[in-house]
Image (cartoon, rainbow, N blue to C red):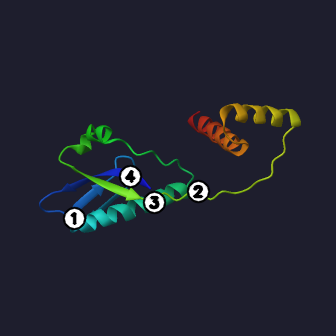
């Protein structure tokens, strides 16, 4: 389970609006405080599902201190939203390496206390991130 902070805003002539500092563009509103709270969880889960489908990285929750320094925190009430994070689907693949490269990988992961699969996934993700940022 992950806990994210949302901002709750209410003007006298509007519904309760909810936004998420960690997820720009993820907003919802409710006519009552309880409805806004419930819809906040649903909106965030849907937003994260969409990010997962698009292969986007899900941000770690920001701390209360971090979000309270944001300009949109002015006149906002903090709402804590708990969501169940779905584990990504794991797929088994068959890859081929030269024996020397595989030996190097195995020595490295042994020193790091990790697995071959975790290392390869991390190395691939890092390569993709670097390529995306130019």
Q: Earlier in the sequence, mark 4 or mark 1?
A: 4
Tag of residue 33: 1
In the picture, measured across the screen, residue 4 lies left or right of residue 100, that is left
Q: Nearer the viewer, mark 3 or mark 1?
A: 3
Distance from disc 3 to disc 2, alpha carbons, whole Å, reads 12 Å
Name the residue at 34% across, 41% down: 63
- Point out residue 114 in the picture as x, y percentages from the top left corner: 67, 39
Q: Nearer the viewer, mark 3 or mark 2?
A: 3
> Do labels 1 and 2 touch, CB within 8 Å?
no
**In the image, residue 32 above or below residue 68:** below
Q: State the residue lying farthest toward the left.
A: 12
> Do labels 4 and 1 touch, CB within 8 Å?
no
Element class at badge 1: helix
Quarter of image, res 43: bottom left
Distance from disc 4 to disc 3, alpha carbons, whole Å, reads 9 Å
Distance from disc 4 to disc 2, alpha carbons, whole Å, reads 18 Å
Residue under label 2, please give it: 88
Badge 4: residue crowd in 10 Å (few <14, some 14–19, many ≥20): some
Element class at badge 4: strand
Q: Earlier in the sequence, mark 1 or mark 2?
A: 1
Element class at badge 2: loop
- Point out residue 69 in the picture as x, y percentages from the top left corner: 27, 37
Tag of residue 84: 3
Name the residue at 73% across, 42% down: 116
Distance from disc 3 to disc 1, alpha carbons, whole Å, reads 22 Å
Q: Quadrant of the N terminus?
A: bottom left
Residue under label 4, please give it: 3
Distance from disc 4 to disc 1, alpha carbons, whole Å, reads 19 Å
Q: Nearer the viewer, mark 4 or mark 2?
A: 4
- Point out residue 131 in the picture as x, y percentages from the top left corner: 62, 36
Badge 1: residue crowd in 10 Å (few <14, some 14–19, many ≥20): some
């Amino acid at each position: 389970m992950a806990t994210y902070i949302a901002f709750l805003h209410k003007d006298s002539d509007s519904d309760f609006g909810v936004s998420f500092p960690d997820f720009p563009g993820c907003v919802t509103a409710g006519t009552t405080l309880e409805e806004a709270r419930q819809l906040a969880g649903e909106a965030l889960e849907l937003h994260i599902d969409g990010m997962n489908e698009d292969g986007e990285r899900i941000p770690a929750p920001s701390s209360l201190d971090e979000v309270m320094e944001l300009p949109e925190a002015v006149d906002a009430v903090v709402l804590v939203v708990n969501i169940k994070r779905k584990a990504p689907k794991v797929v088994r693949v068959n890859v081929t390496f030269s024996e020397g490269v595989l030996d190097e990988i195995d020595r490295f992961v042994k020193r790091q206390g990790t697995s071959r699969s975790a290392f390869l996934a991390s190395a691939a993700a890092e390569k993709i991130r670097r390529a995306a940022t130019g």
